[in-house]
Amino acid sequence: MASQIISLSSIATPNNGVDLDEIMQQKAEHQGCGTSGGSGKASCGTGAGQGDLAPEIWEKVKNHPCYSEEAHHHYARMHVAVAPACNIQCNYCNRKYDCANESRPGVVSEKLTPEQAAKKVLAVASTIPQMTVLGIAGPGDPLANPEKTFKTFELISKTAPDIKLCLSTNGLALPDHVDTIAGFNVDHVTITINMVDADVGALIYPWIYYKNKRYKGREAAQILTDRQMQGLEMLTERGILCKVNSVMIPGINDHHLVEVNRAVKSRGAFLHNIMPLISAPEHGTVFGLNGQRGPTAQELKALQDSCEGEMNMMRHCRQCRADAVGLLGEDRSAEFTTEAVMAMDVEYDLESRKAYQSLVEQERQATADAKRAELETLAGEQSDVKILIAVATKGSGRVNEHFGHATEFQIYEASASGAKFVGHRRVDLYCQGGYGEEEALETTIIRAINDCTAVFVAKIGGCPKASLEAAGIDAVDRYAFEYIEQSVIAYYRDYLDNIRSGAIVHGQRGDAEIRQGAYIAA
Amino acid sequence: MAFKIVSSQCTSCSACEPECPNMAISEKNGTFVIDPAKCTECINYFDEPQCVAVCPVDDTCIIDNNYPRYVA
Ligand code: SF4
Ligand code: SF4
Ligand code: SF4
């Protein structure tokens, strides 16, 4: 195991005589290029490949759908809900209700024992060969349930050693468990860090339970942030990759997150994922009930952009349900209920999984090559025009979803430096907003992608096409089944040509809405 | 001499179970219950009742008035 634990300092490539700060700076930059959205940065090459990332880190993240924006088109992860207990209270969480329509992070309908969970993982991995990652993320805090969490890891690492293990934690108990985590060869840990200032923390966390005592207010937040920073440093020391999640809460920590970004980056986090607050009164959370709003798409992107200069941002997180199974964005958990799984006769076939995964590798390479070739046609292009393009896709990095069937759109930013993935817009659950009718659905989608210049689809009907055009969004089906990034670049090139010839006038688009609720496919 | 759990409020999150110094808490029919014969209100162990301190739902672990207060 020790050989797999790499030292993060090996990422730095110090020149002769550079001082430590400079090395740290390089280290952070190298980590920053690791996974998603690197295409905008010259040093990151294509964003689909390794770039200049240390081979050990690239090895760890390249097939991880949560960490690599490019891998999440091809590989799948699952979460098992073995950890119901929590040791802190967050104002955006309410563990009192477990409603079937619920889909916020932290809410799952099925709690599993470690034995049930292990069997479920094996069953899923045998059926879905792209399943390469198992995460434990709740519904409570995995480290507030250490026995259950580690028992699950133990069972799985015995039978399915090729599955990567990861866990998400609030960090309070993290320093106590870092060595166990390292012992299980858990190579990814996610810590949710929403603040590094106890005054901000007091507005987010009403209390924590620590060392047999309930702490409140500033005191609670101070303990939490100290433990989070300590845990992060300990993970970095042991060479365990650490991602930081932050929930953007407008008016509470939105400006402060830039400071959080700096703090976690300096402690060696390799990725920072800023997620919008999910709050609706029917969730019964403190923020839901007191009317705390979530950010708009533009606010979220602005914050991600302002942090990106310093560190890599993760924009493809869909805040999935903790028990979601399948490719990100595609939930197959209904096939794998506890009942169904326990009745299954599971045979774990490592070889056929490997064979399948090598096919996926080829497809991935083809996508990257196509993008590189297309990018060359943009060489020498000087323009500060940037446009957003929404894409209907089922995965594999292609424009392959019918407009009417899309439950979400992937958003790409096209600029003279190429195509960059910047996020998702969900359009499922539209009935929750009270828009059940066909026509209203179109309005919902338009609201969700209102900041986009075009939407790429495999197919689209005449009516929705007309409504989109009326809203100033170009509905494009000529790239059906083509590679997404290649198409985005091609469209952008035409767009620039059209501006030059005067056929179109480039204008700013408005803001868009972020749908409330975590991702579930209908 | 005991605390009890208001079962209609309990989320079955299990957080209280391992914290009880007397192993008085267990799962029964989907929710958690306190054995009044074992509960000492955490007296002699901790400054505050652990089940109350860890429970995510306010007023779910409460004094059971059917029993006299625990005397150490
Ligand atoms: S919520 Fe979904 S996208 Fe986000 S880290 Fe978890 S599995 Fe990955
Ligand atoms: S008050 Fe203390 S002893 Fe009684 S049930 Fe709660 S944790 Fe156990
Ligand atoms: S901590 Fe509270 S909600 Fe959780 S099981 Fe115990 S009594 Fe129920």
Image (spheres, coloured by chain):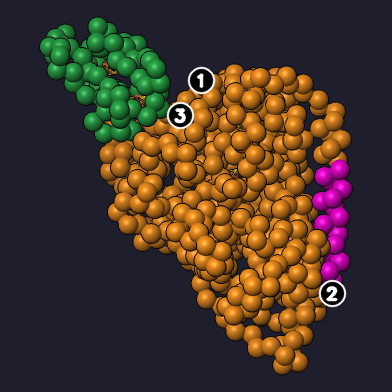
Chain colours: A orange, B green
* Residue with the mark numbered 3: A84
What is the number of the mark on residue A213?
none
Q: Are marks 3 and 1 in contact (CB under 8 Å)?
A: no
Query: x, y (%) of residue A348?
Result: 77, 23
Give how far across and how far down residue A417 sits, in percent.
Answer: 73, 71
Q: Does residue A250 appear to the left or right of A363 in the view shown?
A: left
Task: Please name the residue shown 52% across and 76% down the image.
Answer: A510
Inter-mark Cα distance, 2 to 3: 52 Å
Q: Nearer the viewer, residue A475 or A289?
A: A475
Query: In this picture, which residue range is highlighted in magenta?
Result: A359-377
Q: Earlier in the sequence, mark 1 or mark 2?
A: 1
Secondary element type, mark 2:
loop
What distance separates the C-alpha of mark 3 from that of mark 1? 12 Å
What kind of element bears circle 3? loop
| Disc 1 residue type (three-letter) | Glu
Q: Chain of mark 1?
A: A
Mark 2, residue position: A377
Residue A147's tag is 1
Work out whether residue A274 can be spotted.
Answer: no
- Given residues A437 and A373, the one toward you in this image is A437
Q: Chain of mark 2?
A: A
Q: CA distance from mark 1 to mark 2?
A: 55 Å
Name the residue type under label 2. Answer: Thr
Give me the chain letter of mark 3: A
**Residue drawn at 74 percent across, 86 percent down:** A498
Q: Is mark 3 within 8 Å of ligand 3?
A: yes
- The residue depicted at 65 percent of the width and 88 percent of the height is A505
